Image (cartoon, rainbow, N blue to C red):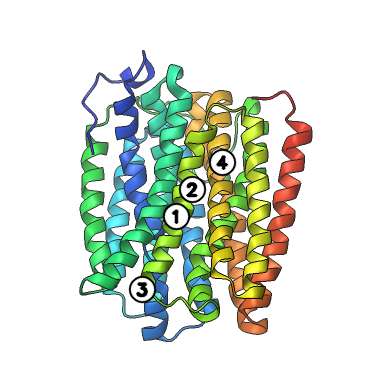
Amino acid sequence: MTTVAAQPQGAALKGRAPSAMIWSAAWPVLAVFILSNAPTPLYVVWQRSLGFSSGTLTAIFACYIVGLLGALLVAGVVSDRVGRKPVLLPAIALAMLACLLFATATSVFVLALARLLTGIAVGATVSAGMAAVTDIGGPERKRLAALAASSAMVMGAGFGPLLAGVLSETVPGPTVTIFVVEIVLLASALVVVARLRLPKGVGGRGAWIRIPAVAPGGRMAVLFGIAVFAPGITATSFVLSLGPSLLSDLLGATNRVVAGVLAFVMFLGATGIQFMVRRLSIRTIMIGSAVATATSMIALAVSVSTSSIVLFGAAAVLAGLGQGMGQFAGLTAISAAVPAARLAEANAAQNVGGYVPAAVLPLAAGFLSDAIGLTSAAASFAIVVFTAAVAGGILVGTRAAGRR
């Protein structure tokens, strides 16, 4: 990991930034997102030791989304007005506090609080951190900056459960060690953020806490981004929240490394696909996202009805492809259409549109599984998300013709 060298105030927006500087600026995004999904393989451990249901499990997961959405109502506006660094430094500190709570959790309440703080940290980072990477890239390297920020997000989201799964099976303290390691990574992210030289905020008037607003020229870009990003991230949220239970109870895979590897491969696909499609038109990438997510839901429905771990793995990978393409295309479209002074708020708007269904639908599936069984709940979830993905693809295909 390379730190970002100091540079004159505002220099991030002038000239052609070196590629290494752009990728280094994305490290805090990756470090925070490692925490976002690190608990995934550990849910079954906590569930067994604390004795809570699938509905409670998804409620704990939903606390993360609640914190994230709450942060998005504030972080984008604050970041654009006062600067990226005053948002990022507290966000990383909250992530470190969440690690301490996870490592010492002895109740559902503490787990829920840790997930809430994680969501706040991630919401602030997804707004200010991604905008900071774009600031470093400057006007000439917006597409590379969008690729760096987006791939850091999904790669971090994948590394977290992989590290947690491996460490929980191979070293003492299955629910402790991963969070000690993550604190070290977050400390390095603090150093990177402290060294970043970014433009100051532009000020402004109006409410500090509000539904993120988008500059007129960027509204269609945000709408198209949400149309494909939301189904994709909802699909991956299902794998992260109920995937370990499906693997253990329905598909017979009880080793926590399996859950961690599956989540890692899902997000590895989400990362790799962004590099593969980066030269295609934004419209083509968005349609590809919708197709991948819809196909993922078909594979999910068939996998739970046939108890096929192979098909479930395929569903997870396709969900990752759908999220990765939708996220990258949305961020790229926004960075091209929205002024830098409103960029963090526009990023927040897209993420609000994506994370709301990513919280509501897996939560509903969790409680539904307590009532009608995991197989039927998963099939119902698949139908809803399949429909949303198809609708998003049709919207982009018919309304975004000619856009790039």
- Camera-near label (1 vs 3) is 1
Q: Which mark is residue 269?
A: 2
Residue 297 at what x, y percent from top left?
Answer: 66, 59
Residue on which the image places disc 1: 265
Residue contact at pointers 2 and 1, CB within 8 angstroms: yes
Seen in the image, is 240 located left or right of residue 9?
right
Mark 2 to mark 3 CA distance (whole Å): 32 Å
- Camera-near label (4 vs 2) is 2
Residue 322 at what x, y percent from top left?
Answer: 59, 47
Residue 207 at what x, y percent from top left?
Answer: 53, 41
Tell me the element at label 4: helix
Tell me the element at label 1: helix
Residue on which the image places disc 4: 325
Q: Which three-letter amino acid code belongs to the residue tagged 1?
A: Val
Seen in the image, is 400 located left or right of residue 58?
right
Residue contact at pointers 4 and 2, CB within 8 angstroms: no
The residue drawn where x is 44% and y is 55% is: 265
Q: Which mark is residue 109?
A: none
